[in-house]
Image: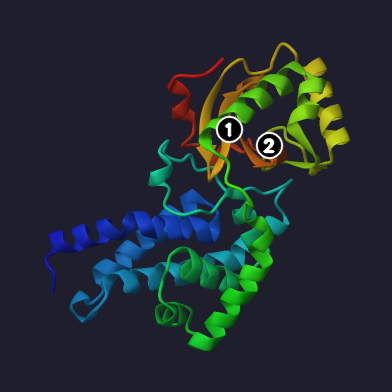
């Protein structure tokens, strides 16, 4: 039996990857951390001397726990008030530190998959888990796993960005969008937004948010013009520029002192999607970042 300190050190070495896997599976950082804590308890009770490959063993535990949670998560999201967005995860400033190339847009595309398709795609295509280990984690034959991953790739193909947006361009566009949207500058917004722009706002029924997606340039322009007129004296004056799950954006605090994150999908220099998270249950980790230097 491995010494207790060795047990802990080994598990902690795998923890960041396990949390990331659980988050990609569930879209909730709180649930991901609960899953990994459960995996830790199971690891402590296991006969570790019989575990040939701890990394594969822990991946299998976390995957199966996530699949159990996904069954109830789908039911909860059917009754969720307004659009559901994954918890916003602020990334390190250095691109090299990004652990994978999944964006918030692709996370939403994963919602269209069955739990098994999602697991097969993430394990094999994103986390580079060998096919045999994926099959063991899902309790399926390798050929079946290969089919699951292939179907998943087909479904999420449109969710992958065609062109990478540089940090410089992304941050420039995010700052320009913040300024134009808070001032109600319709001409500037018209130059920033794509014709097919979509706005999703997640308040979870707990704070004011758009209950339905706002689709199309004309509707978006009318929306921002109306907000600017109605809340001119309550618009946020400062932002904290950040990258959220591979997308440029910012943290702000405006009317009613409601905290929110805004992430922007950009293609060919135009904003094609705006993802606004205002649900306070999803922003517990974000509040402290406003203490960092802001941009006015």
Q: Is residue 185 above or below residue 156?
A: above
**Is 89 positioned to the left or the right of 109 in the image?**
left
Residue at screen point 59% across, 78% down:
148
Question: Label 2, on which residue?
Answer: 269
Quarter location, residue 115: bottom right
Residue at screen point 54% across, 69% down:
121
Q: Residue 45 at what x, y percent from top left?
A: 26, 71
**Within 10 angstroms of label 2, few (less than 14), some, or many (20 or more) residues?**
some
Question: Label 1, on which residue?
Answer: 169
Q: Is residue 222 above or below residue 156?
A: above
The answer to whether the residues at label 2 and label 1 have Cβ atoms under 8 Å apart is yes
**Is 20 positioned to the left or the right of 193 in the image?**
left
Quarter location, residue 38: bottom left
Kind of element beneath mark 1: helix
Residue 111 can be seen, yes or no = no
Q: How many marks?
A: 2
């Amino acid at each position: 039996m491995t010494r207790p300190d060795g047990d802990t050190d080994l598990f902690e070495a795998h923890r960041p990857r396990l949390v990331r896997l659980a988050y990609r599976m569930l879209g909730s950082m709180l649930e991901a951390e609960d899953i990994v804590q459960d995996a830790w308890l199971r690891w402590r009770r296991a006969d570790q001397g019989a575990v040939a490959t701890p990394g594969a063993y822990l991946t299998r535990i976390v995957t199966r726990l996530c699949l159990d949670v996904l069954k109830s998560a789908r039911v909860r999201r059917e009754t969720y008030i307004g659009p559901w967005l994954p918890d916003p995860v602020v990334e390190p400033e250095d691109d090299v530190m990004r652990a994978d190339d999944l964006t918030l847009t692709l996370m939403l595309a994963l919602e269209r998959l069955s739990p098994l398709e999602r697991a097969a795609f993430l394990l094999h295509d994103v986390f580079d888990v060998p096919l045999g280990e994926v099959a063991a984690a899902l309790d399926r034959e390798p050929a079946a796993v290969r089919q699951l991953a292939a179907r998943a790739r087909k479904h999420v193909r449109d969710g992958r960005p065609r062109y990478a947006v540089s940090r410089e361009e992304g941050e420039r566009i995010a700052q320009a969008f913040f300024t134009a949207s808070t001032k109600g500058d319709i001409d500037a917004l018209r130059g920033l937004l794509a014709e097919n722009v979509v706005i999703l706002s997640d308040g979870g029924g707990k704070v004011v948010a758009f209950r339905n997606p706002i689709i199309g340039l004309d509707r978006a322009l009318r929306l921002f013009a109306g907000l600017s007129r109605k809340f001119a004296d309550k618009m946020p004056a400062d932002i904290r520029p950040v990258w959220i799950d591979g997308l440029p954006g910012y943290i702000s605090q405006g009317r009613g002192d409601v905290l929110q994150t805004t992430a922007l999908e950009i293609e060919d220099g135009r904003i094609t999607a705006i993802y606004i998270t205002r649900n306070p249950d999803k922003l517990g980790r974000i509040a402290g970042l406003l203490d960092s230097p802001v941009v006015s």
